[in-house]
Structure formats: C-alpha cells, structure tokens
Image: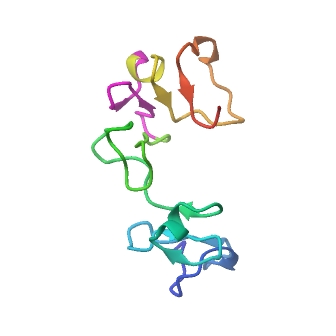
Amino acid sequence: PKWRIDGKCGKNFPAPGGLPAQCDPKSNKPCCSSEGTCGGTDAHCTCEGCVDYRPKWRDDGKCGEYFPAPGASPGECNPNSDKPCCSSEGTCGNTDAHCYCSGCVNYSWSEGNSYNALSRLDGLSLRGLS
C-alpha cells in the first residue's frame, strides 16, 4: 500500500517501497497534515502544506460548484478519463460544450503539457493557471 499502519505520512515517513507515505483515501483519516500524521480535521485536510488524498471527482459524472466531491469543492472531472472536462451545466464530458465553452474547465491540461486548443481560450478556464 501507499500508506503506513502507524498513521504517519509525508516525505519524512516512507511507505513500503520507499516513496513518501500517503493516507488511505477511503478511511476516516484521508489527509496528511504538515506534521506528517493522517487525519480528517481541517488541520489535516485544509492547512498550508496539507495533502487531501480523497478523490477530486465523483462517480456519477457531475462536477462544478453544485456538485462537490469528497476531496474537492467544486467537484472536478477525472483528468485521465475519456471525460476530463466540466461543462457550465455541471457534467463531465469531452465535447466542445464541455471543454471549450465559457465557464468550462478542462482538467486534462496541466502545466508543462502542450495543449492543442490554446487558440480557443476565450472563456476557457484551465486548472493551474490564474
């Protein structure tokens, strides 16, 4: 697993295999505090330096401000799925109405990746850009 049985996490606490330990996203302690302990409070999930391992998207394909996910509000779309974009209506998909409209968010784009639709940015919101 990516987490330790003692509830420790982060760069100072390696998981089996040597990578920094995470917290079990399906447990009641899904977040890693800046001190390196797993928990479910604001001090673990929303503080500076904290990491929330809960899913950022929902299983029902809904997204946006009216559809929060366990680990994100607004809910996102899975960036590695065939429906990585959130429409202004709150559904994940891959059509122009999901990816290239005013109010749409394309979660498949990340810094460092080329993006073939950069010329169509009027109203498009890209995660990671301000």
Q: List x then y, in percent, for residue 79.
A: 49, 40
Q: Is residue 85 magenta?
A: yes
In the rendered image of this protein, does residue 101 appear above or below residue 94?
A: above
Quarter in which the C terminus is drawn: top right
Residue ranking furthest to the left: 60
In the rendered image of this protein, does residue 72 appear above or below residue 8?
A: above
In the rendered image of this protein, does residue 14 appear above or below residue 125?
A: below
Render colour scheme: rainbow
Q: Bounds of the magenta span?
A: 81-96
Q: Is residue 88 magenta?
A: yes
Which residue occupies the foreground of this view, 25 or 83?
25
Please indicate whether residue 64 sits to the left or right of residue 20 in the image. left
The part of the image, by quadrant, that contains residue 40 is bottom left
In the rendered image of this protein, does residue 15 appear above or below residue 57?
A: below
Q: Residue at x 40, y 43 (%)?
A: 75
Q: Residue at x 31, y 48 (%)?
A: 59
The part of the image, by quadrant, that contains residue 74 is top left
Name the magenta segment's main secondary structure.
loop
Q: Residue at x 42, y 34 (%)?
A: 82
Please indicate whether residue 79 sits to the left or right of residue 64 in the image. right
